Image (tube, rainbow, N blue to C red):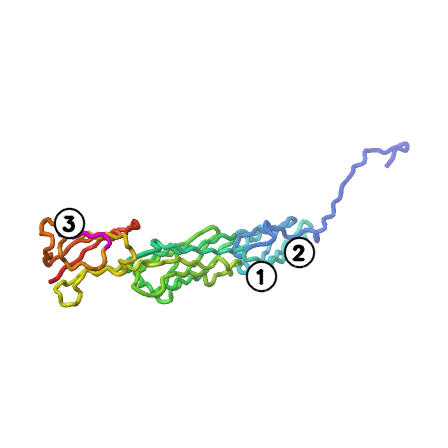
Amino acid sequence: MTTNGCDAAPRLAITVTFENDALVQIVSTDNTPCVFQGVSYSIANGKSNYVWSVTNGTITTGGGNADGSVTISWSDVGPGQVSVTYINNCDETTTKTLGVTVASCSDLTITNTVSNPTPNFGDEIVFTITVNNVGEGTIINTLVSELIPSGYSLVSFSTTTGVYDPATQIWTIPTLNAGQSQVLEVKLLVLPSGNYNNVATIEISTPLDVDPTNNSATALVEPICLTVYNEFTPNNDGTNDLFRIDCIESYPNNELKVFNRYGALVYSKVHYENDWDGTANVSGVINRGDMLPTGTYFYVITLGDGTVKKGWLSIMR
């Protein structure tokens, strides 16, 4: 309407925006999700009546009728899909779908250490096997083989998690979170013969490890051949007449000292050569050159390399 050729009132400018719903897609916090890793997904222009669905995954948070976002834990490596149906700002029902490719993102490592790499026969040693998840995602159902070599017998074992089966010699770890480590300790008795190098191996996991090159670890052990036969019968019958120490010749700087039950020195020799017949060579409670009586004595063997071995011996006549 005009008056005298002029507008009767100021014109109002109105801005009209047309929303292209096809351009609005599901967005995520991680475009390359890892298996078992929680990833958030959202839709920007939704309004109400959300219905979320997932293939190859599980909704862990959100996902309700009023939720424009969800957090999804992907169940397995490979293709996955997240979809949402909702009423948009134009009161239209629409569905959006996003395909994903789920990666493993896992990396397990294993270490194997031994409490004493040079034990004596008859000693007990402990192997410590540690499995580490240095990847980004959680790993489940990890199986680790700890096959006891023939040079040992099992004494005991313990784990920080899971179960070690001494029959199958398999350690099962139910769950290993990112950045987490778990430990198996195996105590073994060193036998006089057999194989002594201990190998622990990650056999399988879910998902499979992306780098299998660090899934096996060996602890090297070289027992010392130093067995002390602590009972002998010096009666000149030709059998077991001398105090014998296996492999003592491998330690030319050795020294043997024998004490009676009261702590008095009765025998001493540098570079012992398995030739003692129970005769005292130190005067004291008994004269030098006299035969020691039947009884229990205490020995100290210094090997010359810093190693000292102590124990008891019995003379029987």
Regarding mark 2 in the picture, which secondary structure is present there? strand
Identity of the residue drawn at 14% across and 50% down: 282
Q: Which residue is mark 2?
A: 94
Regarding mark 3 in the picture, which secondary structure is present there? strand
The range drawn in magenta is 260-271
Is residue 47 on the magenta stretch?
no
Label located before the other in sequence (1 or 3): 1
Quick check: 291 above or below 4? below
Disc 3 marks which amino acid? Answer: Leu
Q: Which residue is mark 3?
A: 265
Disc 2 marks which amino acid? Answer: Thr
Quadrant the C terminus occupies: bottom left
For the residues bearing labels 1 and 3, Cβ distance under 8 angstroms: no
Q: Residue furthest right?
A: 4
Residue 141: x, y in percent? 45, 61
Regarding mark 1 in the picture, which secondary structure is present there? strand
Q: Which residue is mark 1?
A: 78
